[in-house]
Amino acid sequence: MEIASDETTRICNHCDRAIPSSNIDLHYAHCSRNLEKCNVCGDMVPIRHAKEHFLNTHAPVACSLCSATMERGNLDIHKGESCPQRIVNCEFCEFPLPAIDLAEHQEVCGNRTEMCYQCNRYIRLRERYNHASRCTGIAENNVESSRNVRAPEREQGAPRRQPPEYSRKRLIFTIAVTGIAVLFGSLFFQKKAEASQ
């Protein structure tokens, strides 16, 4: 059964949609009785759900992280993408911190160095991916292998550097201990301030 594609349409005066001319009267009666246009977004919503639509979508709410006020419908996007207090991870140490502090933290964190175990050079963390793609595995100042260059140091009993995973674990442990100490310190001073009042 074919549907006539050349059937004329008319615009409903209530919802501004194109409706087949043969159904316009029935549509208009139903539409004007049951639907209402939202004053904020222009969507047609059932009259009995208009207040609920406004409260769930357009009512002003404050972000629990940064206290900025916005429409409820935009809150999830704000918290996930643009809130300055949302928690993000540093690309170098994976430490979680507020997005507003990320650039300053990464400026310092990216300047830390780790040894490249192919060429035995210290490389800034922010440059490690570029370095890894062009590292030849040969120390730049010597033609000898890096094992031969480091051999005298080992014989003298110089301590060997731990692999990067060990230093990352130690860094995360140090950050965690520092965070706990700050938390306990702030709770202590808060209790002390409450007691003095």
Image: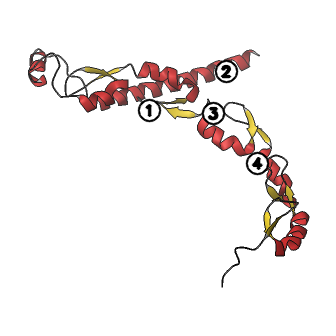
Q: Going by the picture, which residue comes out furthest to the bottom?
A: 1
Foreground disc of the pair 1, 4: 4
Residue 6 drawn at (x, y percent): 72, 73
N-terminal label among 3 and 2: 3
Query: Circle 4 — which element?
Result: helix
Which mark, residue 83?
3
Q: Which residue is mark 1?
A: 94
Mark 4 Cα shell of 10 Å, populated few (<14), some (14-19), many (≥20): some
The answer for how far apart the CA atoms under marks 2 and 1 are is 30 Å
User: Residue at image x 87%, y 73%?
Assistant: 26
Decide which of tag 2 and tag 4 comes sooner along the chain: 4
Which secondary structure lies at badge 1?
A: loop
Q: Residue at x 63, y 38 (%)?
A: 79
Q: Position of residue 94 (x, y in %)?
A: 44, 32
The residue where tag 4 is placed is 57
Residue at image location 11% in from the left, 24% down from the top = 147
The answer to whether mark 3 and mark 2 are in CB contact below 8 A is no
Three-letter amino acid code of the residue under disc 1: Glu
